[in-house]
Image (tube, helix red, strand yellow):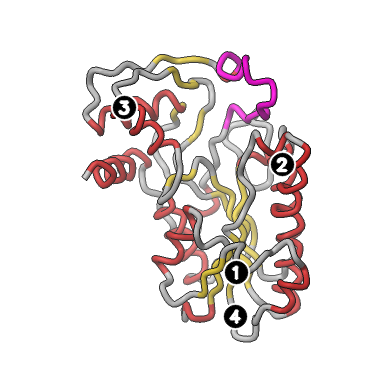
Amino acid sequence: MDDRTFVIIGSNGQLGRALQQKYPNAVGVDSDKLDITNAEAVNNFDWSNVKVIFNAAAYTNVDGAESDGGKTTAWDVNRNGVKNLAEIATAHDITLVHISTEYVFDGTKSPHNEDEPISPLSEYGKSKAAGDEQAGRVPKHYIIRTSWVIGDGKNFVRTMLAVGKKGISPVVVADQIGRLTFTSELVRAIDHLLSREVPYGTYNVSNGGELASWADITRAIFKDAGFDDLKVTDTTTGEYFADKPQAAKRPLESTLALDKIEATGFKPRDWQEDLRKYVEKELA
């Protein structure tokens, strides 16, 4: 594949940075270079030699999307921006790789497979589901549904490492269950789909390994980091957000079924293995 024909939307985000590292010759743009919510700007962008668009851009402030202003922005980026890209991809015979989320589900089933009807609980989830619908109209599309993303940027692992360095024993939610997805693994899966010309459609992607709660993951982080004197105390989602009335509802089950992508020959790496490497690098 000639990565000079790739465009990465949202190149400054966690996944965007990982994609740029994998495809160094790709054109990377963020909102300051291309506002995907502006149809005219999208139409005027030079798409003449583009073969693949990676849409790694999204409004991801889950709680912020519950406010009036945040809701407007979430729908503008997560639905309308995708619509603009989808129309371009269709018109120019471009493959659209669009990143989705387990937040399009209500979290009452486990694991979530690609055919499960959408049932979002939050405005963020609703806006992402609407974007998936737009991306799915492109003849050549991959919708990559993922969860709990960890990469180069603000994320849960870095937050917990900062807490541990301060000697704080945290209280962490223990009734949300899933697996981490490291951006390195996400990019490896995307490259697998493209390079092997796997049939277009929706694919779940996360790391493999045992299911875990955020509290379990925090214990793993502290173990890998050597924070042996710190204790992680479990709490429930309801208890954690009891004094946060503006918080969005979150799915309790975030586990994604990986059978479909595994059937294409992709073998997901264990999240605990990638976590150890990530923590080691962060503490180096």
Instruction: Please provide percent x and percent y for residue 116.
Output: 69, 42
Vertical order, 183 against 83 (above or below): above
Instruction: Please provide percent x and percent y for residue 249.
Output: 67, 28
Q: Nearer the viewer, mark 3 or mark 4?
A: 3
Pick whichever of labels 4 and 2 is earlier in the sequence.
4
Residue 134 appears in view: yes
Instruction: Please provide percent x and percent y for residue 201.
Output: 64, 60
Q: Amino acid at mark 4?
A: Val
Q: Which residue matches tag 3? A: 164
Q: Which of 200/148 is in front? A: 148
Query: Which residue lies at the image location 58% right of the left edge and 30% below the top edge?
Result: 253
Residue 117 appears in view: no
Q: CA distance from mark 2 to mark 1?
A: 22 Å
Q: Nearer the viewer, mark 1 or mark 4?
A: 1
Q: CA distance from mark 3 to mark 2?
A: 31 Å
Tell me which segment is drawn in magenta.
238-253
Which element is circle 2 on? helix
Q: Which residue matches tag 4? A: 50
Query: Which residue lies at the image location 74% right of the left edge and 35% below the top edge?
Result: 67
Q: Residue furthest bottom?
A: 48
Vertical order, 254 against 219 (above or below): below
* Residue 243 counted in the magenta span: yes
Q: Nearer the viewer, mark 4 or mark 2?
A: 2
Viewed as shown, does residue 99 lie left or right of 80? left
Q: Which residue matches tag 1? A: 33
Pick whichever of labels 2 and 1 is earlier in the sequence.
1
Q: Which residue matches tag 2? A: 70
Using a 10 Å C-alpha cutoff, classify the residue at mark 4 as few (fewer than 14 neighbours), some (14 to 19) or many (20 or more): some
